[in-house]
Amino acid sequence: MTIKEVARLAGVSPAAVSRYLNGGPLSKDKKERVARAIEETGYRPNLMAKTMRTGRVRQVGIIVPRIYSESVNLMMEGITEELLSMDYLTVLGYSDTNRDRELQYLDIMQSNRVAGIILMATTLTDIKKRSLENCSVPLVITGQNFDRLHCVYHDDFNAMRELTELFIQKGGKRFVYIGAPEADLAAGLARREGAQEALRRAGYDAQQLPIRIANFNSQDGYTAMMELLEKYPDLDSVVCATDVIAHGAMKALREKGRRIPEDVRIAGIGNNWADLVSQPELTTVQFYQKRCGSEAARLLLKLIEREDEQDAGRNNGVEPGNVMLSYRIIERGSV
Protein backbone atom coordinates (compact mmCIF):
# COMPACT_ATOMS: atom_id res chain seq x y z
CA MET A 1 0.00 0.00 0.00
CA THR A 2 1.42 3.36 -1.07
CA ILE A 3 0.46 6.97 -0.35
CA LYS A 4 -0.78 7.26 -3.95
CA GLU A 5 -3.15 4.32 -3.45
CA VAL A 6 -4.48 5.87 -0.22
CA ALA A 7 -5.00 9.14 -2.09
CA ARG A 8 -6.83 7.37 -4.92
CA LEU A 9 -9.15 5.60 -2.45
CA ALA A 10 -9.84 8.86 -0.58
CA GLY A 11 -10.35 10.81 -3.80
CA VAL A 12 -7.66 13.36 -2.94
CA SER A 13 -4.15 14.17 -4.10
CA PRO A 14 -1.06 12.46 -2.61
CA ALA A 15 -0.04 15.92 -1.29
CA ALA A 16 -3.29 16.05 0.72
CA VAL A 17 -2.50 12.67 2.30
CA SER A 18 0.99 13.94 3.12
CA ARG A 19 -0.44 17.05 4.77
CA TYR A 20 -2.82 14.88 6.81
CA LEU A 21 0.01 12.65 8.00
CA ASN A 22 2.14 15.65 8.96
CA GLY A 23 -0.60 17.62 10.70
CA GLY A 24 -0.80 20.24 7.95
CA PRO A 25 -3.81 22.36 6.90
CA LEU A 26 -6.59 20.38 5.25
CA SER A 27 -10.35 20.83 4.91
CA LYS A 28 -12.60 18.87 7.25
CA ASP A 29 -14.06 16.86 4.35
CA LYS A 30 -10.64 15.81 3.06
CA LYS A 31 -9.42 14.95 6.57
CA GLU A 32 -12.40 12.63 7.08
CA ARG A 33 -11.91 10.96 3.70
CA VAL A 34 -8.18 10.40 4.24
CA ALA A 35 -8.80 9.11 7.77
CA ARG A 36 -11.35 6.56 6.47
CA ALA A 37 -9.00 5.42 3.72
CA ILE A 38 -6.13 4.92 6.17
CA GLU A 39 -8.39 3.03 8.58
CA GLU A 40 -9.71 0.77 5.81
CA THR A 41 -6.29 -0.01 4.37
CA GLY A 42 -4.23 -0.04 7.56
CA TYR A 43 -1.69 2.18 5.77
CA ARG A 44 1.48 3.12 7.65
CA PRO A 45 3.90 5.71 6.22
CA ASN A 46 7.30 4.49 5.05
CA LEU A 47 9.44 6.31 7.59
CA MET A 48 12.71 5.04 6.11
CA ALA A 49 11.81 6.43 2.69
CA LYS A 50 11.09 9.84 4.14
CA THR A 51 14.34 9.78 6.08
CA MET A 52 16.26 9.00 2.89
CA ARG A 53 14.45 11.75 0.96
CA THR A 54 14.86 14.54 3.51
CA GLY A 55 18.13 13.47 5.10
CA ARG A 56 16.50 13.80 8.54
CA VAL A 57 15.56 11.05 10.97
CA ARG A 58 11.98 11.03 12.27
CA GLN A 59 13.06 12.15 15.72
CA VAL A 60 12.68 15.36 17.69
CA GLY A 61 15.28 16.51 20.18
CA ILE A 62 13.99 17.91 23.49
CA ILE A 63 16.38 19.85 25.71
CA VAL A 64 15.21 20.26 29.33
CA PRO A 65 16.82 22.26 32.17
CA ARG A 66 15.86 19.82 34.92
CA ILE A 67 14.29 16.37 35.16
CA TYR A 68 12.91 16.55 38.71
CA SER A 69 10.35 19.26 37.87
CA GLU A 70 6.62 18.56 37.81
CA SER A 71 6.13 21.26 35.16
CA VAL A 72 8.79 19.67 32.92
CA ASN A 73 7.09 16.29 33.32
CA LEU A 74 3.73 17.73 32.28
CA MET A 75 5.26 19.48 29.26
CA MET A 76 6.98 16.25 28.24
CA GLU A 77 3.64 14.44 28.44
CA GLY A 78 2.05 16.98 26.09
CA ILE A 79 5.01 16.92 23.69
CA THR A 80 5.30 13.15 23.43
CA GLU A 81 1.56 12.61 22.94
CA GLU A 82 1.54 14.96 19.96
CA LEU A 83 4.75 13.66 18.42
CA LEU A 84 3.92 9.97 18.84
CA SER A 85 0.57 10.53 17.14
CA MET A 86 2.59 11.58 14.08
CA ASP A 87 5.13 8.76 14.43
CA TYR A 88 7.98 10.89 15.76
CA LEU A 89 10.27 9.60 18.49
CA THR A 90 11.92 11.89 21.04
CA VAL A 91 15.54 12.25 22.11
CA LEU A 92 16.03 13.87 25.53
CA GLY A 93 18.92 16.15 26.44
CA TYR A 94 19.26 17.14 30.12
CA SER A 95 21.20 20.39 30.57
CA ASP A 96 20.91 20.85 34.36
CA THR A 97 20.49 24.60 33.53
CA ASN A 98 24.05 24.62 32.14
CA ARG A 99 24.18 26.99 29.15
CA ASP A 100 27.24 25.36 27.63
CA ARG A 101 25.56 21.97 27.81
CA GLU A 102 22.44 23.38 26.11
CA LEU A 103 24.60 24.58 23.22
CA GLN A 104 26.36 21.22 23.09
CA TYR A 105 23.01 19.40 22.79
CA LEU A 106 21.92 21.82 20.06
CA ASP A 107 25.05 20.99 18.05
CA ILE A 108 24.80 17.23 18.62
CA MET A 109 21.11 17.06 17.68
CA GLN A 110 21.63 19.07 14.50
CA SER A 111 24.63 16.90 13.56
CA ASN A 112 22.49 13.80 14.00
CA ARG A 113 19.85 15.24 11.67
CA VAL A 114 16.85 15.31 13.98
CA ALA A 115 13.72 16.67 12.30
CA GLY A 116 13.38 19.47 14.86
CA ILE A 117 14.22 20.61 18.38
CA ILE A 118 12.15 21.80 21.34
CA LEU A 119 14.13 23.75 23.95
CA MET A 120 12.67 24.37 27.41
CA ALA A 121 14.57 27.60 27.88
CA THR A 122 15.58 29.49 31.00
CA THR A 123 18.22 32.10 30.17
CA LEU A 124 19.45 33.83 27.02
CA THR A 125 22.94 35.09 26.20
CA ASP A 126 24.15 36.70 22.97
CA ILE A 127 26.06 33.52 22.07
CA LYS A 128 23.08 31.31 22.79
CA LYS A 129 20.71 33.57 20.84
CA ARG A 130 22.98 33.42 17.77
CA SER A 131 23.08 29.63 18.06
CA LEU A 132 19.29 29.45 18.27
CA GLU A 133 18.76 31.84 15.36
CA ASN A 134 21.23 29.87 13.22
CA CYS A 135 19.77 26.46 14.07
CA SER A 136 19.68 24.35 10.89
CA VAL A 137 16.47 22.48 11.82
CA PRO A 138 13.04 23.79 12.94
CA LEU A 139 13.21 25.00 16.54
CA VAL A 140 10.57 25.90 19.15
CA ILE A 141 11.24 27.48 22.56
CA THR A 142 8.98 26.86 25.56
CA GLY A 143 8.67 29.00 28.67
CA GLN A 144 10.27 32.15 27.23
CA ASN A 145 9.38 34.75 24.61
CA PHE A 146 12.59 35.41 22.68
CA ASP A 147 12.60 37.83 19.73
CA ARG A 148 12.70 36.31 16.23
CA LEU A 149 12.25 32.77 17.53
CA HIS A 150 9.18 30.53 17.63
CA CYS A 151 8.01 30.37 21.25
CA VAL A 152 5.21 28.95 23.40
CA TYR A 153 5.18 30.74 26.75
CA HIS A 154 3.14 31.75 29.79
CA ASP A 155 1.82 35.18 30.79
CA ASP A 156 4.21 35.47 33.74
CA PHE A 157 3.88 39.23 34.13
CA ASN A 158 0.08 39.37 34.40
CA ALA A 159 -0.11 36.17 36.44
CA MET A 160 2.10 37.69 39.14
CA ARG A 161 0.39 41.06 38.86
CA GLU A 162 -3.03 39.48 39.45
CA LEU A 163 -1.69 37.30 42.28
CA THR A 164 -0.25 40.36 44.04
CA GLU A 165 -3.53 42.21 43.56
CA LEU A 166 -5.23 39.39 45.46
CA PHE A 167 -2.99 40.16 48.46
CA ILE A 168 -3.97 43.82 48.25
CA GLN A 169 -7.66 42.93 48.10
CA LYS A 170 -7.19 40.81 51.23
CA GLY A 171 -5.72 43.76 53.12
CA GLY A 172 -1.99 43.26 52.62
CA LYS A 173 0.05 46.33 53.55
CA ARG A 174 3.69 45.39 54.17
CA PHE A 175 4.95 43.37 51.21
CA VAL A 176 8.15 41.48 50.57
CA TYR A 177 9.08 39.54 47.44
CA ILE A 178 11.16 36.38 47.08
CA GLY A 179 12.07 36.08 43.43
CA ALA A 180 13.95 33.81 41.06
CA PRO A 181 17.24 34.69 39.31
CA GLU A 182 16.47 37.41 36.77
CA ALA A 183 18.65 35.91 34.07
CA ASP A 184 15.48 33.83 33.64
CA LEU A 185 13.43 36.50 31.87
CA ALA A 186 10.08 34.80 32.58
CA ALA A 187 10.18 33.34 36.10
CA GLY A 188 12.71 35.90 37.30
CA LEU A 189 12.31 39.29 35.63
CA ALA A 190 8.71 39.25 34.35
CA ARG A 191 7.25 37.95 37.62
CA ARG A 192 9.09 40.53 39.72
CA GLU A 193 7.92 43.31 37.40
CA GLY A 194 4.36 41.98 37.60
CA ALA A 195 4.39 42.18 41.40
CA GLN A 196 5.76 45.71 41.29
CA GLU A 197 3.14 46.78 38.76
CA ALA A 198 0.33 45.60 41.06
CA LEU A 199 1.80 47.60 43.93
CA ARG A 200 2.29 50.64 41.72
CA ARG A 201 -1.36 50.56 40.63
CA ALA A 202 -2.40 50.42 44.29
CA GLY A 203 -0.39 53.52 45.14
CA TYR A 204 2.69 51.89 46.70
CA ASP A 205 6.26 52.90 45.95
CA ALA A 206 7.06 49.73 44.05
CA GLN A 207 10.78 50.50 43.89
CA GLN A 208 10.94 50.18 47.67
CA LEU A 209 9.63 46.60 47.62
CA PRO A 210 12.05 44.45 49.66
CA ILE A 211 13.38 41.70 47.41
CA ARG A 212 15.45 38.59 47.95
CA ILE A 213 16.45 36.09 45.26
CA ALA A 214 16.14 32.30 45.67
CA ASN A 215 17.56 29.79 43.22
CA PHE A 216 14.43 27.73 42.47
CA ASN A 217 14.65 25.59 45.63
CA SER A 218 12.96 25.51 49.02
CA GLN A 219 16.20 25.89 51.00
CA ASP A 220 16.89 29.24 49.31
CA GLY A 221 13.28 30.23 49.99
CA TYR A 222 13.77 29.39 53.66
CA THR A 223 17.01 31.40 53.87
CA ALA A 224 15.53 34.41 52.07
CA MET A 225 12.51 34.40 54.37
CA MET A 226 14.70 34.31 57.47
CA GLU A 227 16.65 37.33 56.18
CA LEU A 228 13.48 39.26 55.42
CA LEU A 229 11.96 38.49 58.83
CA GLU A 230 15.11 39.76 60.47
CA LYS A 231 15.06 43.05 58.59
CA TYR A 232 11.29 43.53 58.23
CA PRO A 233 9.70 41.88 61.27
CA ASP A 234 6.32 43.56 60.69
CA LEU A 235 5.85 42.13 57.16
CA ASP A 236 2.39 40.74 56.45
CA SER A 237 2.52 39.63 52.79
CA VAL A 238 5.08 37.36 51.10
CA VAL A 239 4.86 37.03 47.31
CA CYS A 240 7.05 34.23 45.88
CA ALA A 241 8.13 33.59 42.28
CA THR A 242 7.50 29.84 42.61
CA ASP A 243 5.66 27.43 44.88
CA VAL A 244 8.90 25.62 45.75
CA ILE A 245 10.36 28.88 47.05
CA ALA A 246 7.11 29.57 48.92
CA HIS A 247 7.24 26.22 50.75
CA GLY A 248 10.69 27.03 52.08
CA ALA A 249 9.45 30.45 53.17
CA MET A 250 6.46 28.86 54.95
CA LYS A 251 8.82 26.67 56.96
CA ALA A 252 10.74 29.76 58.11
CA LEU A 253 7.52 31.56 59.05
CA ARG A 254 6.35 28.61 61.15
CA GLU A 255 9.69 28.39 62.93
CA LYS A 256 9.41 32.07 63.81
CA GLY A 257 5.93 31.57 65.21
CA ARG A 258 4.09 33.43 62.44
CA ARG A 259 0.60 32.14 61.71
CA ILE A 260 -0.47 31.73 58.08
CA PRO A 261 -2.62 33.55 57.01
CA GLU A 262 -3.56 35.30 60.27
CA ASP A 263 -0.17 37.03 60.66
CA VAL A 264 1.35 36.63 57.21
CA ARG A 265 -0.17 35.83 53.82
CA ILE A 266 1.93 33.92 51.28
CA ALA A 267 1.53 32.57 47.73
CA GLY A 268 3.57 31.36 44.77
CA ILE A 269 3.30 30.18 41.18
CA GLY A 270 3.22 26.57 40.01
CA ASN A 271 0.30 24.60 41.46
CA ASN A 272 2.26 21.45 42.28
CA TRP A 273 1.20 18.52 44.45
CA ALA A 274 2.89 19.89 47.59
CA ASP A 275 0.50 22.86 47.63
CA LEU A 276 -2.34 20.55 48.66
CA VAL A 277 -0.50 18.94 51.59
CA SER A 278 1.00 22.11 53.08
CA GLN A 279 -0.61 23.63 56.16
CA PRO A 280 -2.48 25.67 55.15
CA GLU A 281 -2.83 24.79 51.48
CA LEU A 282 -0.89 27.23 49.30
CA THR A 283 -2.55 29.83 47.10
CA THR A 284 -0.97 29.70 43.67
CA VAL A 285 -1.15 30.34 39.93
CA GLN A 286 -1.74 27.41 37.61
CA PHE A 287 0.02 27.47 34.26
CA TYR A 288 -1.14 24.91 31.70
CA GLN A 289 2.12 23.01 31.30
CA LYS A 290 0.79 19.99 29.42
CA ARG A 291 -0.92 22.29 26.93
CA CYS A 292 2.37 24.20 26.61
CA GLY A 293 4.04 20.97 25.53
CA SER A 294 1.22 20.09 23.13
CA GLU A 295 1.24 23.55 21.54
CA ALA A 296 5.03 23.46 21.18
CA ALA A 297 4.90 20.07 19.47
CA ARG A 298 2.09 21.15 17.11
CA LEU A 299 3.98 24.33 16.23
CA LEU A 300 7.15 22.33 15.57
CA LEU A 301 5.30 19.87 13.33
CA LYS A 302 3.97 22.79 11.27
CA LEU A 303 7.50 24.15 10.90
CA ILE A 304 8.79 20.72 9.86
CA GLU A 305 6.01 20.35 7.30
CA ARG A 306 6.68 23.83 5.94
CA GLU A 307 10.33 22.94 5.49
CA ASP A 308 9.40 19.67 3.76
CA GLU A 309 7.08 21.56 1.40
CA GLN A 310 9.81 24.07 0.58
CA ASP A 311 12.31 21.24 -0.03
CA ALA A 312 9.82 19.78 -2.50
CA GLY A 313 9.48 23.14 -4.28
CA ARG A 314 6.06 23.96 -2.78
CA ASN A 315 4.92 26.61 -0.32
CA ASN A 316 1.89 25.79 1.81
CA GLY A 317 1.66 29.30 3.27
CA VAL A 318 1.90 28.16 6.90
CA GLU A 319 3.40 30.92 9.03
CA PRO A 320 3.23 29.78 12.66
CA GLY A 321 3.50 32.54 15.25
CA ASN A 322 4.30 32.66 18.92
CA VAL A 323 1.73 31.35 21.40
CA MET A 324 1.07 32.92 24.83
CA LEU A 325 -0.98 30.71 27.15
CA SER A 326 -3.46 31.75 29.83
CA TYR A 327 -3.34 31.05 33.57
CA ARG A 328 -5.65 30.57 36.56
CA ILE A 329 -5.42 31.92 40.11
CA ILE A 330 -6.19 29.20 42.68
CA GLU A 331 -7.07 30.75 46.02
CA ARG A 332 -6.45 28.52 49.03
CA GLY A 333 -5.88 28.95 52.76
CA SER A 334 -2.54 30.75 52.71
CA VAL A 335 -4.05 34.14 51.86
Image (spheres, grey):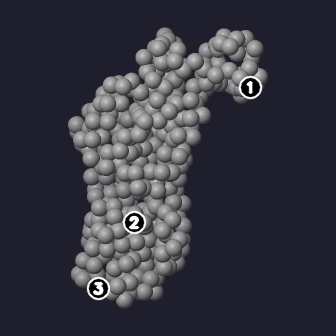
Work out how far the residue at label 2 is from the one at label 1, CA to CA, in angstroms.
47 Å
Q: Secondary structure at mark 3?
A: loop
Q: Report whether 215 appears left or right of 335.
A: left
**Residue type, label 1:** Glu
Q: Residue at x 30, y 30 (%)?
A: 107
Give yes or no for contact between labels 3 and 2 (Cβ–Cβ under 8 Å).
no
Question: Image check: 133 left or right of 74?
Answer: left
Give percent across and percent down for residue 133.
32, 31
Please name the amino acid that badge 2 sits on. Val
Q: Is residue 160 above or below residue 44?
A: below
Disc nearer the start of the sequence (1/3): 1
| Mark 1 and mark 3: Cα distance apart in space | 68 Å
Tally of marks: 3
Please rate how many residues cluster around mark 1, counting C-alpha atoms within 10 Å: few if below 14, some from 14 to 19, many from 20.
few
Q: Earlier in the sequence, mark 3 or mark 2?
A: 3
* Residue 121 visible to an observer of this rendering: no
Q: Which mark is residue 244?
A: 2
Expressed as whole percent of the image width and height from the top left, the position of residue 292 reads 50, 46
Vertical order, 254 against 168 (above or below): below
The residue indicated by pointer 3 is 233
Task: Give the residue type that dot 3 points to.
Answer: Pro
Label 1, on which residue?
Answer: 39
